Each structure stands twice: as C-alpha cells, then as structure tokens.
Image: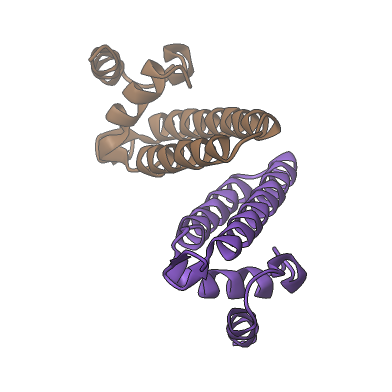
Chain colours: A purple, B brown
Amino acid sequence: MQVMNAGWTQVEEEVARKAFDIAYKREINALIDSVRSKASCLNEIEDMWHLHDFLSVKRHEVDGRYDYNLPMLVFVFAGLIKDGWITVNELEGLNSDKIAKIMALSYM
Amino acid sequence: MQVMNAGWTQVEEEVARKAFDIAYKREINALIDSVRSKASCLNEIEDMWHLHDFLSVKRHEVDGRYDYNLPMLVFVFAGLIKDGWITVNELEGLNSDKIAKIMALSYM
C-alpha cells in the first residue's frame, strides 16, 4: 500500500517537488536576465521607476505563486504550464486525474 | 525695487532653480549608475529583492525631496548640502540670512 499525503503518493510528491523547483529556477533565472537587461538600458528616471514597478509586480507574482502546498499544487502547476515555466511532460508520474485537472485549469 | 515672491528675489529664484536642477540631475545620474551596477551583479533572487527594496526607498526619497516649493527651499537645500548633492558655493546669490539658515539646518 502506498503512503498518501493529501491525495498525493510519495512518487507523485517527488515528481511535483522536482517540477516545482525546476519552474522556480527557470522563472527566477529569466527574471534576473530581464532585470539585468532593463538595467543596462536605463537612461532616464522614468526607466528606473518602470524597473521598480516591474520588480513590484514580479515580487508579488513570485511570492504568491511559489507556495509549495499540496492541496493547491494543481492550481500552481496549471499556472506554470500556462505561463510556459514547465511542460506537461515534466509532470509525468502524476496520476491521470491530476494531469487532466491541471491541463483543464491551464486553459482557463 | 525688486519683485519678491515669498521672500525670494527674482535673482535668488534663478540661483535656486539652477541649484535645484543641478542637484536633481546629479542625484538621478548617481542613482542610475548605482542601479546599473547592482543589476550587473545580480545572481540570486535575494539580490533582486534587495534591488527592489533599494528602489522603493530611493523613489520615496526622491519624490519627497524634489518638490520645488519656495517656502520649503531652505530645508530642501539643507538636505542637499548634507547629502553632498550641492555645495554652498552653488547657492551664491542667495542672501546671507538664507545661506545661514540653510547651513545651520544642514548640520542638524
């Protein structure tokens, strides 16, 4: 018998944790590249405040998104697929019900 | 008879406007250089949030400081001298009372 935690098997949890960490690393690296690029083009004070606004939005998004909480993971993964930070292939190992839910939510 | 505006002669207003604009340009240029430099060293997400915090503080400071309002200018110039954005020589043309007030405030 497999040990389940909030409807996730141990194998599913490992798949989820790995996908979650990959997405986080990708999004953060892309964000760092983007900030470096924007900063290298700074010429006016307005550019600097645009960078500040951009960072405010991204910090809010990242803080809100990367909360590793099993009951909420289908929503998190749907968002990550929608925004291109992971592919459904990287969720291989989750059961088909979860994959179906994630894909359905990702189209919303 | 010289035309006065809130206790400032026309010549004093010209001196003040010039010094104010010079300080603004210096502070903004230094800030842009500083943000570019910080951004070029970004490696971790914490660096990015430190940059965000830094921009939040600087935006608040700049917005608060550069309000061109004659009755408040002695306070503004005192702060600008204290923080090194202008020298007292750049206020030459203001009357000695104003210079004395500005210098006294700049030591507080």
User: Where residue A80 sits in the image (x, y, percent)?
Assistant: 63, 68
User: Where residue A32 sits in the image (x, y, percent)?
Assistant: 67, 44
Q: Is residue B1 visible?
A: no
Q: Dividing the picture into quarters, in which one does residue B36 lie?
A: top right
User: Where residue B31 sits in the image (x, y, percent)?
Assistant: 56, 32
- In this image, B9 relative to B104: left or right? right
Question: How many numbered discs sit on the rendered protein?
Answer: 0
Residue nearer the viewer, A20 or A9: A9
Q: In the picture shown, does residue A74 fall above or below A107?
A: above
Question: Who's the residue at 77% across and 70% down the image?
Answer: A89
Question: Who's the residue at 26% across and 13% down the image?
Answer: B100
Question: Who's the residue at 33% across and 40% down the image?
Answer: B3
Q: Is residue B96 visible?
A: yes
- In this image, A106 relative to B21: left or right? right
User: Where residue B97 sits in the image (x, y, percent)?
Assistant: 24, 17
Q: Residue furthest front?
A: A1
Residue nearer the viewer, A4 or B77: A4
Q: Dividing the picture into quarters, in which one does residue B68 lie?
A: top left
- In this image, B55 relative to B81: left or right? right
Q: In the picture shown, does residue A97 fall above or below B99?
A: below
Residue nearer the viewer, B7 or B59: B59
Residue nearer the viewer, B34 or B95: B34
Q: In the picture shown, does residue A14 fall above or below B60?
A: below
Question: Which quadrant holds the C terminus of chain A?
Answer: bottom right
- In this image, A15 relative to B87: left or right? right
